[in-house]
Image (cartoon, rainbow, N blue to C red):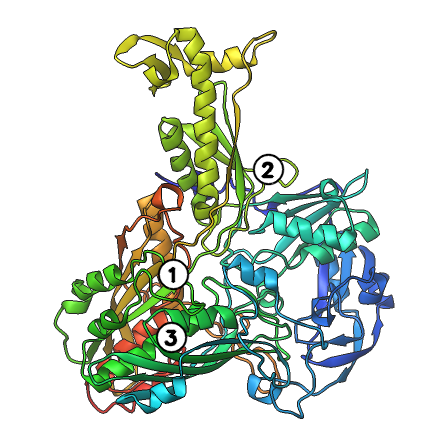
């Protein structure tokens, strides 16, 4: 089914948050710190306050004190922790006036020592980046299906490490000592930005009776509402969040500007809008962290894995971080490894705080693990897919947290990859083919949905989770199957937080998985209510009725029918005797349905220049059951492109002073059309026993294996092992000839 909202987006009639124009709307612009670490001596705002069109200039001391650590305060107070931290805000009649006034604000900073990377941050003599009680966000971690801190035993935390994730099984040291082959290497991944088309933008209006209404392209309206409730100590009905169409999110649009704008709007008692520019987005938004992983992977001569040791760290910027636990789960649970010792450090530095980006913790874990597996296959002279199949975890095997794997599709994806033409086709001069695997455990949240039958006979479904991936169209198909009508007659609407049933945040590949069951149950109950009325009108039992072409008919007697429109009218007429058709469905999926994927990359290289081209690509993924196959394929395709981008050039490059040097689309290398190959998407369907109609989460896995698949292909084409992405093409010049 084509996406329900697609036509409006294609013809330009979709109204995004930036299109809203409320009566009395004022505009906000923020002053950002140009220093990554400094004490604020003073802020001079007199000139800005007297500038034409300016309504107010606000600094941190003018706002109510909130329960937030220094980097998370709406406006900096006393000191700044990263370049890009908001220091002051100008409220003016126009965007231009607000911009002009920001240039009149003078901030006197006392520069402090900058902690620019994890190595320096963990030195004993390093300055403390965060306040002592700063820790990773447990909410962010649980939203993506993992614990923030997975310590199985006490671990000494180095300086500026907010938490440590540890996973152990058996004796890794003894296992490595007894291995026939050990791959020992360090792998690095740059931080990357979600790079959505629509920068952050928010509109807030104070309400006459108290409270606020917030319009925002948030992935989590209820999460945002709850955050503002805590901020204002307000009742739930006093905070209304209207989820707007999301112009790209990928984990980066849950909560960011909204607390600041709420406080500013209440201060001036006027509706306000704040929109970030692209350059501001790069330094204010919350990107994905950089990571370094030291890996030792040991195996017997026959390819049996025996031990894994890993020490890894995340550069979280000025926040506690929460990715290490997820990464440890991937490292320790993907393959049957009897002995492992995994320790991950969440490190704070003076950079923009990080957060979620599609499959957080996955690209980092699997770039290291799948690169090491490829190096091991070369050492053992084994086919790389055969090595993976020999050691693949299967149903009943223990994951890193000692819980048994449910039914998973890892083996089926590998078997399909082994037969795929991108993998099997002959190699020409300077060509190589690489393979890499990825997985995602999947998040899940209790959910509810409403359903009613409209006067025209269509079915309306109400949910509280925004559609960031075509999920509403898939939910319409689920409702149609439950109710017994065509999906074109189902409409899924996302309501605001005052009227919508509770819905999960659109993150962690959980929307369809968590909400689909509630939608199915709601539509099934609406059908039951409709047939209840038809039973009396047709004098037939509900088991003898069916819905066909907008009618309820008696099975086998097509001439005995009643139009759905008439049944709806009977349930809503004045002095009527039938109750309205208004249903509610609820869902609480208690088990995850992990999804696996295998990517194959084929490259052509030029050893004289280091240039390379990805000439073929395949993404094979277990999706449980594809509710809407074209959109499922589109999700896999889009995730694969983002994954490839991390290898081809995307990076947040910071200098030694903590300044971002790739903070625009002139410098940040998104993959362009000529770089992206044709991607063959192959869906493997191993239905989930608990997901709606057998579906599993789809969005996260395809964003994971690309970097390893490409660097593995480069290693086989050139003989040069690339252990850092994005790929530095100059490294490939060392290859004297195709390998």
**Which residue sits at x=81%, y=42%?**
210
Query: Is label 2 in a helix, a strand or a loop?
Result: loop
Q: Which residue is mark 3?
A: 367
**Mark 1–mark 3 contact, CB under 8 Å?**
no
Horizontal and vertical percent position of residue 613: 28, 73
Q: Which residue is mark 2?
A: 500
Q: Is residue 284 among what the camera can see?
A: yes
Residue 599 against residue 263 in the figure, above or below? below
Q: Quadrant of residue 575?
A: top right
First of labels 1, 3 by sequence position: 3
Horizontal and vertical percent position of residue 515: 48, 43
**Which residue sits at x=42%, y=36%?**
476
Q: Quadrant of residue 637?
A: bottom left
Horizontal and vertical percent position of residue 125: 67, 93
First of labels 2, 3 by sequence position: 3
**Which residue sits at x=35%, y=62%?**
640
Quadrant housing the N terminus? top left
User: Circle 1: is it few (<14), some (14-19), or many (20+) Cα within 10 Å?
Assistant: many
**Which residue sits at x=72%, y=64%?**
30
**Mark 2–mark 3 contact, CB under 8 Å?**
no
Q: Which residue is mark 1?
A: 701
Q: In this image, 310 relative to 79: left or right?
A: left
First of labels 1, 2 by sequence position: 2
Whole-number angstrom distance, CA of label 1 to CA of label 3: 13 Å
User: Circle 3: is it few (<14), some (14-19), or many (20+) Cα within 10 Å?
Assistant: many
């Amino acid at each position: 089914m084509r996406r329900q909202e697609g036509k409006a987006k294609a013809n330009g009639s979709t109204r995004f948050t930036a299109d809203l124009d409320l009566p009395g709307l004022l505009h906000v612009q923020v002053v950002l710190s140009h220093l990554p670490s400094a004490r604020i001596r003073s802020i001079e705002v007199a000139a800005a306050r007297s500038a034409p069109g300016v309504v107010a200039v606000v600094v941190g001391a003018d706002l109510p004190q909130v329960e937030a650590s220094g980097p998370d305060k709406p406006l900096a107070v006393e000191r700044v922790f990263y370049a890009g931290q908001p220091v002051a805000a100008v409220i003016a009649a126009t965007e231009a006036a607000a911009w002009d006034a920001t240039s009149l604000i003078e901030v006197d900073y006392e520069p402090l020592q900058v902690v620019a990377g994890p190595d320096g941050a963990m030195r004993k003599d390093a300055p403390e980046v965060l306040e002592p009680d700063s820790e990773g966000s447990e909410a962010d971690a649980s939203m993506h299906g993992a614990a923030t801190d997975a310590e199985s035993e006490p671990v000494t935390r180095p300086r500026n490490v907010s938490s440590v994730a540890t996973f152990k099984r058996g004796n890794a040291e003894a296992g490595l000592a007894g291995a026939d082959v050990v791959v020992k290497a360090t792998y690095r991944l740059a931080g990357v930005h979600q790079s959505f088309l629509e920068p952050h933008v928010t509109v807030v209006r104070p309400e006459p009776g108290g409270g606020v209404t917030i319009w925002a392209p948030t992935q989590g309206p209820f999460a945002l509402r709850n955050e503002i409730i805590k901020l204002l100590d307000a009742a739930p009905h006093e905070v209304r969040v209207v989820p707007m169409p999301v112009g790209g999110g990928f984990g980066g649009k849950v909560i960011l500007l909204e607390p600041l704008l709420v406080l500013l709007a209440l201060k001036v008692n006027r509706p306000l809008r704040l929109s970030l520019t692209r350059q501001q987005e790069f330094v204010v938004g919350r990107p994905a962290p950089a990571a370094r992983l030291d890996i030792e992977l040991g195996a017997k001569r026959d390819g049996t894995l025996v031990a894994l040791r890993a020490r890894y760290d995340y550069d979280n910027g000025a926040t506690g971080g929460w990715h290490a636990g997820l990464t440890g789960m991937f490292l320790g649970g993907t393959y049957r490894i009897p002995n492992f010792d995994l320790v991950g450090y969440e490190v704070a530095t003076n950079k923009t705080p990080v957060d979620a980006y599609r499959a957080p913790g996955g690209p980092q874990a699997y770039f290291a693990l799948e690169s090491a597996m490829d190096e091991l296959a070369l050492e053992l002279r084994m086919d790389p897919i055969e090595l993976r199949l020999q050691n693949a975890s299967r149903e009943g095997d223990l994951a890193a947290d000692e819980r048994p794997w449910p039914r998973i599709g890892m083996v089926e994806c590998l078997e399909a990859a082994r037969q795929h033409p991108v993998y099997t086709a002959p190699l020409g001069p300077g060509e190589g083919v690489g393979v890499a695997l990825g997985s995602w455990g999947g998040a899940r949240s209790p959910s509810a949905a409403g359903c009613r039958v409209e006067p025209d006979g269509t079915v309306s479904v109400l949910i509280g989770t925004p559609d960031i991936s075509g999920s509403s169209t898939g939910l319409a198909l689920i409702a149609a199957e439950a109710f017994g009508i065509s999906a074109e007659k189902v409409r899924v609407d996302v309501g605001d937080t005052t009227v919508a049933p509770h819905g999960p945040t659109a993150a962690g590949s959980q929307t369809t998985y968590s909400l689909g069951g509630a939608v199915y149950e709601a539509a099934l109950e609406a059908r039951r209510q409709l047939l209840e009325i038809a039973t009396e009108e047709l004098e037939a039992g509900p088991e003898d009725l069916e819905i066909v072409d907008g009618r309820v008919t008696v099975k086998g007697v097509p001439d005995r029918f009643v139009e759905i429109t008439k049944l709806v009218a009977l349930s809503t007429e004045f002095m009527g005797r039938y109750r309205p058709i208004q249903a509610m469905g609820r869902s609480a999926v208690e088990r995850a349905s992990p999804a696996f994927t295998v990517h194959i990359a084929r490259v052509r290289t030029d050893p004289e220049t280091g240039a390379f081209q990805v000439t073929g690509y395949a993404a094979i993924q277990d999706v449980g059951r594809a509710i809407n196959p074209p959109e499922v394929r589109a999700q896999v395709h889009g995730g694969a492109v983002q994954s490839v981008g991390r290898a081809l050039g995307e990076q947040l490059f910071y200098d030694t002073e903590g300044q971002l040097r790739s903070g625009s689309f002139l410098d940040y290398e998104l993959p362009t059309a000529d770089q992206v190959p044709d991607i063959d998407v192959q869906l493997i369907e191993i239905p989930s026993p608990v997901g709606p109609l057998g579906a599993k989460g789809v969005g996260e896995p395809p964003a994971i294996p690309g970097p390893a698949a490409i660097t593995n292909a480069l290693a086989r084409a050139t003989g040069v092992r690339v252990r850092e992405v994005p790929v530095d093409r100059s490294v490939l010049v060392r290859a004297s000839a195709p390998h």
